[in-house]
Amino acid sequence: MIHIYDKARQLVPLKLWMERVEDLEEGALQQAMNLTVLPFAHHHIAVMPDAHQGYGMPIGGVLAAKEAIVPYAVGLDIGCGMRAAETTVKVKDLSRQKIDLYLKQMGKMIPQGFNWHKKPQKHEIFDELPDDVGILAAEAKNVRHQLGTLGGGNHFIEFQSDANGMLWMMIHSGSRNIGKKVAEHFHQRAVKLCRARGEELPSSELSYFPFHSEEGQEYFRAMSWCQKFSRTNRERMMEVVLDVLGESPRQVIDIHHNYASIEEHFGEKVIVHRKGAIKAEKGVKGVIPGSMGTHSYIVEGLGNGEAFNSSAHGAGRKMGRKQAKRSIPVERVLREMEAKGIQLQTEYLNDLPEECSEAYKDIDYVIRMQSDLVKVEVKLRPVAVLKG
């Protein structure tokens, strides 16, 4: 872990779970340093080994805030996360033809990309939707069509094998369009309020609400509902996946990596923002995926307070989406997947370079750099993927 603290320039230290400072891109390092001068930053800023530049705050950053909540320190896809299920199926019993059939069935039943269900979905989560939050009320009709949909980009459903040859199913997805709408709506409100107060911030993307203000509480309610919706979304998709397989899982693990929660750290109650980071409390299981075509991990948290009980959420990008599409041919990605024996289904072939292993950091480096944050329980090898 690297400790950076210049008292003349920072209000709190910066702690990086990396081998070298140079492992963090310049833009992300500047964003991390910006966090250290926020008057409400508590104790220090923690940056995970998968960190890269985001809006305002690095993806892979952890900010503990005193009496403040920052929409862009939560992220756009509120509640985005992972759900993994251990099955009783032996991978060796699955032929390529059977896996291909399963992929097609799942693809038909679970809308991907910008597609939603044609009919509104029923679930008690919609009874909990706060009716006093305008942006949620405005999206109340659309969001009923989004439940149980995968989305696009780095969202996926993956068949994976553990060391004993048992099949695991893994889903990466979030709050779909509703989370993005909520994030952008409240960020714009925060910008206006900070300007009206004459706040001097290192970036307008770090605009915030006092936590107990009317706006702060409204955002927290909206964010919390989006977080619940995101978990329910993954739950609904996993039900479909397991139904296609005819399976009752041995265990299911679900964990968020874009959210804020009220916790106690270093003697104070604070709002912990985990943007592209997971909670890694002692004994709590987590899911850390690799990039498309690389290993993923089931881990157990070690409860390291120096990281605010957090860890990395994945491999972390080393190449922007546009850069990846410009420099990595689709054919090369397809050859790599074929060489590794990984079956692939997607309606978005041109987007494959965005998610290939070349566009991401080495997941094994990430795991190695955070050996004091989590311990590995299961290493998973990809077998097939349905990419959104």
Image (tube, grey):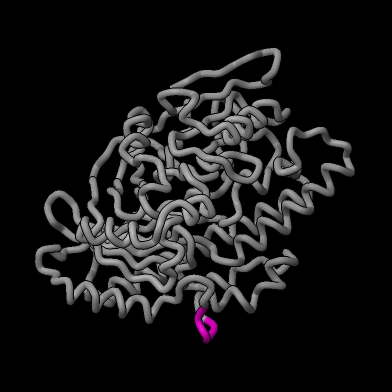
Q: Position of residue 86 (x, y in %)?
A: 24, 59
Q: Position of residue 121 (x, y in %)?
A: 51, 80
Q: Main secondary structure of the magenta part?
A: loop
The C terminus lies in which quarter of the figure? bottom left
The tally of labels here is: 0
Residue 124 seen anywhere in this rendered image of the structure = no
Farthest residue, direction bottom: 119
In percent of the image, x 69 and y 57: which residue is there? 184
Query: Is residue 277 toward the left or the right of residue 268 in the image?
Result: left
In this rendered view, identify the residue nearer to me: 303 or 355: 355
* Quadrant of res 182: bottom right
The N terminus lies in which quarter of the figure? top left
The magenta region covers 116-120
Query: Is residue 298 toward the left or the right of residue 90 in the image?
Result: right
In percent of the image, x 56 and y 24: which residue is there? 14
In this rendered view, identify the residue nearer to me: 125 or 277: 277
Above-or-below relation of 114 to 342 = below
- The stretch drawn in magenta includes residue 131: no
Above-or-below relation of 121 to 359 = below
